[in-house]
Amino acid sequence: METLILVLHVVAALTIIGLVLLQHGKGADMGAAFGGGASGSLFGATGSANFLSRITAGVATVFFLTSLGLTWYSSHATEDKGVMATHPASQAPATAPGTSAPAPASVPDKPAVDADSKAKDIPK
């Protein structure tokens, strides 16, 4: 189902690109008034603009709906397709057979300081 929506989405996007490139800009009407030849087109002088704009609006609606459909489908997917789902969880390194794991190094809370060494460090 996702593939069908994705194909329809790409086709709608390419169709919108083509339809927008076929349409005339706002400045093209002035050129048609001085013999541009637009009055002899298949849909008439203004018929092609209305026809292409309505088709573009319809395809844009399909594009919008397929965008929403793909968003909904990806947020409600049942399986996790992430990279981390394919790798096992990291484990602690194994020790060689017959040896025990090294003991963690102990760190004293406060360093031991005797009064004589403290007195020697102070300059007079």
Image (cartoon, rainbow, N blue to C red):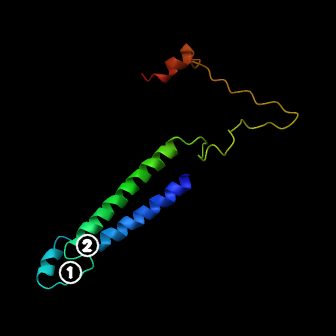
Residue 121 sits above or below residue 7 on the image: above
Residue at 45 percent across and 64 percent down: it is: 11
Q: Type of residue at label 1? A: Ala
Q: Residues within 10 Å of mark 2 (few under 14, many from 20)?
A: some
Would you name the residue on which mark 1 appears? 38
Counting from the top left corner in percent of width and height, residue 123 is at 44, 24
Under circle 1, the secondary element is helix
Image point (32%, 63%), residue name: 56
- At 54% from the left and 52% from the top, the residue drawn is 2
| SS label for mark 2 | helix
Q: Residue at x 12, y 77 (%)?
A: 30
Q: Where, by quadrant of the figure, is residue 33 drawn?
A: bottom left
**Residue 58's image quarter?**
bottom left
Residue 85: image location, x then y, percent:
63, 43
Q: Which mark is residue 101?
A: none
Q: Amino acid at mark 2?
A: Ser
Q: Which residue is mark 2?
A: 48
- Give left or right: position of 39 versus 72: left
Q: Are marks 2 and 1 in contact (CB under 8 Å)?
A: yes
Q: Residue 108, position in %: x, y? A: 61, 20
**How many labels, in total?**
2
| Picture quadrant of residue 45 | bottom left
Residue nearer the viewer, 89 or 10? 10
Q: CA distance from mark 2 to mark 1?
A: 9 Å
Q: Is residue 107 above or below residue 46?
A: above
Q: Position of residue 41 (x, y in %)?
A: 25, 80
